[in-house]
Image: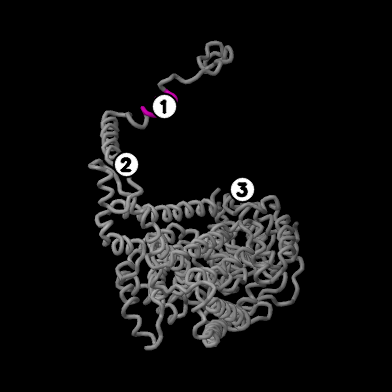
Amino acid sequence: MTGTSQMQVSDEVAITIDGMNKWYGSFHVLRDINLTVYQGERIVICGPSGSGKSTLIRCINALEEHQQGTITVDGTLLSSDLKNVDKIRSEVGMCFQHFNLFPHLTILENCTLAPIWVRKTPKKEAEERAMHFLEKVKIPDQANKYPGQLSGGQQQRVAIARSLCMMPRIMLFDEPTSALDPEMIKEVLDTMIELAEEGMTMLCVTHEMGFARQVANRVIFMDAGQIVEQNEPEAFFNNPQSERTQLFLSQILGH
Amino acid sequence: MSDKTTNPIAFVAKGTIPPAPPPASQAGVVKWVRDNLFSSVPNGVLTLVALAVIYLLLQKTVPWLVNGVWTTSSLNECREVLDGRVGACFSVLTERWHQLLYGFKYPADQYWRPNLALVLLLVAAAPVLFFDLPRKLLIFTGLYPFIAFWLIWGGTIMAPIVALVGFVAAGAVFQIYGRGSFALGFFGGIATALIVWTLGGMLIPEGASDNAMLQAVPSRDLGGFMLNLMLGVTCVSLSLPLGIALALGRQSDMPLIKWICVVFIEFVRGVPLITLLFVASVMLAYFFPPDATVDLFLRVVIMITLFSAAYIAEVIRGGLAALPKGQYEAADSLGLDYPQAMRLIILPQALKISIPGIVNVAVGLFKDTTLVSVISMFDLVGMIRGPILASTEWNGVYWELLGFAAFLFFIVCYGISQYSQWLERRLATDHR
């Protein structure tokens, strides 16, 4: 599994963020964000809480609106045009801190709902694909249970499978392991590592620095709504340049 | 640590103890009585007082029920038969049952029509209430309003057919144009329906209802418990979708829609239902063209529907507010559009949370249909207060008549309540 970070990064651009600014009322949450993500890249975004890292990735699939600058995903400009927004959302998968599975649907229905209604996939085909991805995240035997019957780690893996069923080209992870017990974190991270090895473009907000070292080919450090530092993981962890990064790393790796 | 041989903790069982029954004072009826009725002195006293009260109640009511007279033809005859004994005069029910159930003007030889409509109502409601039944049955549910209209009101069959064609045409227009633009489909659908109804209305010849297969019965001839059921079923089934639309509209990002919904809900909730009913019976005519006569039944249905829709909207708003924001975000992030997210993710959960509140409104609405008696419609209560108690034969029979009315309403309301509890258990998926 070592050497993941050298894999399959193409020079095809997946996401371009150019001069993006966002305010909540008069509070300036994101300040002049410029970022280019290439197809197949695995980017870990870290930073203290309130630094805007979740807001940044939520802007990419328009869960949050930005007020200035442009975001282009797979060549589609993110604007207020609902058609573009829906197109981008169906190409970008997202996993949330609290899983957000649909509690009134079974695991299988959770996975087939969007393909059937958004992609108009025939039901049988959607179910086959869902079972394929549920096998991949190693819970095919739970397919007919409801989310409330599963553990947190299993729920998060279902959430990943649910996103994958839409065949996304990009996956966003918003602190996918922060709400989990320690022993469940590993099963979710293993699933994400497997995904990374297959060349999925990933943007991941996480505090799992071991995951960042092993999987990421770029680590971004944010503070106060700004990208403070970004580098390859080796250089980032061993030789941080900015004072704020050094402080953050000393606190997070200190124990 | 002490020596092993003197260890006081060490123990080995010498054999198997055979199972034995519990002592008599700790099992069966004795235990239950002791635990629940005489667990302490105050509880014992309360039990005895309660038993005395129950005895007094039964002492009065049982003879009244048992001695009840069923076959006389007036209250005076009842009194003669009873000859001073305590006893109910149920004869009023056996003699006037048709008035209590159908009103006093519905033609007696046509009672089979509302009866059949009631039976078909159960068939039509089944696939809606019990969603494990095959979905194809919903086709009949969709046709039922037109069949029921024809059965109860009679007259020319062309009227319900034209109405049905209007709805089908509107639906088709919405299907075709609603895909591109919701507004175009929506208003186009309404326009189409109005055109079809106008043209259809002109096609029906003037005297078509005079010698139709089913004798025409005007709305003012409907009455009795039948009228309560008709109002209740129609208004509940119309106010639920309207309430959902109002609740969603109140959450809308579009200021115009949002404010229309807010003003409507707040206005209707601030006005007593009885006021709205008087408006329906007297004043609504001012808002229609002078020569248009809108049926009184329809006017009352509109008013009760609007009234309960406002309440249902607020109940559903509570359900919507109870959903975590993450459900909306998950639906958005999967690329579902607004109608899909609402229909597949948000409303199923919000409605499930709202079931107790919605049932509360529905039961209240059903009982409120008796208010139409104050605008001179002869529903069950209107029949009792009007023609029956005013007649010389039955003047003074209150307990029997009002008790019968209470009994009928209780059966229906208790049924609704039991259904809702079943539904809640059936839908409980989040923590089992």
Q: Residue at x 32, y 44 (%)?
A: B68
Q: Residues within 10 Å of mark 1 (few under 14, many from 20)?
A: few
Residue at the spot of label 1:
B29
Q: Indicate the position of residue B274 as horizontal and vertical percent values.
A: 30, 70
Q: Nearer the viewer, mark 3 or mark 2?
A: 2
Circles 3 and 1, Cβ within 8 Å, touching? The answer is no
Q: Are marks 3 and 1 on the same chain?
A: no
Q: Is residue B171 left or right of residue A2?
A: left
Circles 3 and 2, Cβ within 8 Å, touching? The answer is no
Q: Indicate the position of residue B173 as horizontal and vertical percent values.
A: 60, 82
Disc 2: host chain = B
Above or below, B315 against B21 in this view is below
Per the image, label 1 sits on a secondary structure element best described as: helix
Amino acid type of disc 2?
Asn
Q: What are the residue bounds of the magenta stretch? A: B26-34
Could you say which is closer to the camera, residue B179 or residue B91?
Answer: B91
Residue at the spot of label 2:
B67
Question: Magenta stretch containing residue B131, yes or no?
Answer: no
- Measured in 3D between alpha carbons, the distance from the residue under mark 3 to the one under mark 2, in whole angstroms, is 75 Å
> Can you see residue B306?
no
